[in-house]
Image (cartoon, rainbow, N blue to C red):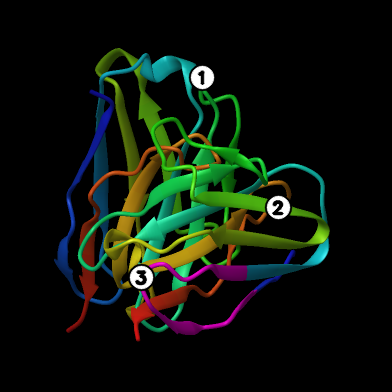
Amino acid sequence: DIQMTQSPSAISASVGDRVTITCRASQGITKYLAWFQQKPGKAPIRLISTISSLENGDPSRFSGTGSGTEFSLTISSLQPEDFATYFCLQHESLPYTFGQGTRLEVK
Amino acid sequence: EVQLLESGGGLVQPGGSLRLSCAASGFTFSNYRMTWVRQTPGRGLEWVSSIGENSGYTYYADSVKGRFTISRDNSRSALFLQMNSLRAEDAAVYYCGRFHGMDVWGQGTTVTVSS
């Protein structure tokens, strides 16, 4: 199984800050790594697919990078609506696995 | 509008059964692989099962293999998860999702396993 280790588990930040969240995979991933945002009581929304492809309609302040075993989600300039929980998903190798999540909080 | 709507969750005793449904609309359901995942505060998100476009394959997490069965009815644009021999650790919010990469999620349905 591919283990996804996500860090940090929580971040305190302010509007306008640049924030980076990382997922490390226990084995190499070539393509199928996605990032999601989830707000309390709501279903997750996919932000990024295939490592770096931004979903249609999602703001360009979100970006995904990485290769091999290390992947990152960056929010270039935090907006008030970005405070939420973020997590990664690898769906390259069964069983598909999620990161533990990063809670992005207002400082 | 692309939409997924789960139903069928509820309270069930340990050892009991439950059948979850996911109604799809706004897209050609038969063209897409579909997935069930679950979420708990303690364990986070866990992939449960996936099924091919024409039910040509089904995959399961080890934790549910032999107890859960995923199926679909393309004529009704519906996805199902039959859950048998339920355990306390199966209690979660269950989401259906489009494709293995979960580009669209339902709103979730809550399963509670308790005596």
Residue highlighted by disc 3? A15
| Disc on res. A78 | none
The reply to whether the C-beta atoms of the residues labelled 2 and 1 are less than 8 Å apart is: no
Of the two numbered discs 2 and 1 in the rendering, the one whose residue sits closer to the viewer? 2
Quick one: SS at disc 2?
A: strand
Of B6 and B112, the residue lying toward us: B6
Of the two numbered discs 3 and 1 in the rendering, the one whose residue sits closer to the viewer? 3
Q: Amino acid at mark 3?
A: Val
Task: Rate crowding at label 3 as few (under 14), some (14 to 19) or many (20 or more) other CA atoms within 10 Å.
Answer: some
The part of the chain drawn in magenta is: A6-21
Residue A9 colored magenta?
yes
B64 relative to B113, above or below = above
Identify the chain of the residue marked 3, using the numbered disc in the image. A
Residue name at image x 47 percent, y 84 percent: A10
Identify the chain of the residue marked 2, using the numbered disc in the image. A
Of B65 and B103, the residue lying toward us: B103
Of B38 and A88, the residue lying toward us: A88
Residue highlighted by disc 2? A65
Give the distance between the C-alpha atoms of the residues marked 3 and 2, in whole angstroms: 22 Å
Place of residue A103 in the rendered image (x, y in percent of width and height, measured from the top left): 41, 77
Quick one: SS at disc 1?
A: loop
Q: Quadrant of residue A81?
A: bottom left
Q: Amino acid at mark 2?
A: Thr
| Disc on res. B54 | 1
Give the distance between the C-alpha atoms of the residues marked 2 and 1, in whole angstroms: 34 Å
Left or right: B33 as drawn, with respect to B115: right
Considering only order in the chain, which callout, 2 or 3, is on the residue closer to the N terminus? 3
Q: Quadrant of residue B100?
A: top right
Give the distance between the C-alpha atoms of the residues marked 3 and 1, in whole angstroms: 46 Å
- Whether labels 3 and 2 belong to a single chain: the reply is yes
